[in-house]
Image: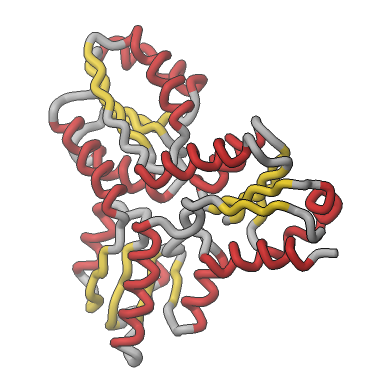
């Protein structure tokens, strides 16, 4: 439809940490074309980017056990970080470690360690199976056994007695978590603690992205969120917006085909994207809508 109003969020696409990781790996390969470059886990949560890196000869591995024996070159720690034992294992190989953990994620790890050292019961607000949270948890566990991951208030019940006994509770947050989830958990934990120390470690990029998308949605008939379904910050964007306006979460432009009628009937379309969504995908989404007749 030629009369559609398309609005793109300013904070859409690569955040600083993701751009830094992708640019560094590409530059590393350009400067060392004949050397092996391995990445432990997906550098970022985006299939298109991983595919593009593979075309350059950069190998993504699921685990350290997949590293070829006696291989040399570089091993990249992805933006989500890695457990301390991974770093230790890599030191015994012939590979040079390139640590591309997002600086904001590093801060969460450091705060979790700090809380553990000070004797707090460390609570990580986030998804236990997410690689960022796994690394934060592993770092804190080096210093204390009193560490738990909570993603919803319902999960507090299983450790409620332990928390009451400990009395000193310390909180850190997955960088891409929703502030509403953090607030709900804090409200539930407050009566259990004599002392509650909270580090709101949700990164600024996530906060600004969510706030801007909410404002954009208020003036839109339809919101399109572009990014991987595995990306926590992208999924949270879609969850937040779906409570306000009709929202579509797509991974790439091909996913739009099944929503053609919804897109055509919308007069004002707001578009946002997760922190690991490349500009190419965003541009293709806009082009698709503009060219659809």
Residue 30 image offset from top left, x and y in percent: 34, 86
Compare residues 259 and 263 and report the one nearer the observer: 263
Q: Is residue 153 above or below residue 261?
A: above
Residue 220 image offset from top left, x and y in percent: 68, 41
Q: Is residue 56 above or below residue 265?
A: below
Quadrant of the image occupied by residue 24: bottom left
Residue 230 in view: no
| Left or right of 249 on screen, residue 51 | left
Q: Is residue 189 above or below residue 86?
A: above
Q: Which residue is farthest bottom? A: 34
Residue 9 image offset from top left, x and y in percent: 54, 50
Q: Residue at x 43, y 42 (%)?
A: 208
Q: Residue at x 56, y 65 (%)?
A: 47
Q: Residue at x 66, y 50 (%)?
A: 224
Q: Quadrant of the N terminus?
A: bottom right
Q: Residue at x 35, y 33 (%)?
A: 124
Q: Which residue is farthest front? A: 3
């Amino acid at each position: 439809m030629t009369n559609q109003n398309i609005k793109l969020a300013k904070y859409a696409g690569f955040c600083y940490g993701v751009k830094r990781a992708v640019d560094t790996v590409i530059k590393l390969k350009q400067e060392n074309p004949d050397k092996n470059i391995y990445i432990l886990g997906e550098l970022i949560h985006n299939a298109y980017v991983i595919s593009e890196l593979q075309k350059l000869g950069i190998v993504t591995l699921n685990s350290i056990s997949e590293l070829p024996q006696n291989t040399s070159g570089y091993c990249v720690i992805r933006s989500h970080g890695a457990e301390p034992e991974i770093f230790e294992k890599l030191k015994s190989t012939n590979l040079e470690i390139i640590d591309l953990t997002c600086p904001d994620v590093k801060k969460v790890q450091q705060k979790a360690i700090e809380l553990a050292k000070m004797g707090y019961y460390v609570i990580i607000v986030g998804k236990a199976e997410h690689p960022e949270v796994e690394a934060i948890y592993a770092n804190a566990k080096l210093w204390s056994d009193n560490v738990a991951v909570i993603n919803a208030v319902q999960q507090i019940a299983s450790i409620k007695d332990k928390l009451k006994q400990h009395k000193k509770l310390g909180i850190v947050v997955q960088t891409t978590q929703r502030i509403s989830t953090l607030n709900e958990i804090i409200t539930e934990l407050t009566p259990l603690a004599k002392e509650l120390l909270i580090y709101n470690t949700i990164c600024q990029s996530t906060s600004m992205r969510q706030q801007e998308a909410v404002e954009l949605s208020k003036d839109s008939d339809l919101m399109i969120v572009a990014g991987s379904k595995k990306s926590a910050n992208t999924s949270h964007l879609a969850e937040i917006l779906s409570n306000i306006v009709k929202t579509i979460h797509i991974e790439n432009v091909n996913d739009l085909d099944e929503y053609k009628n919804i897109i055509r009937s919308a007069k004002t379309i707001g578009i946002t994207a997760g922190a690991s969504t490349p500009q190419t995908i965003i541009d293709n989404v806009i082009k698709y809508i503009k060219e659809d007749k």
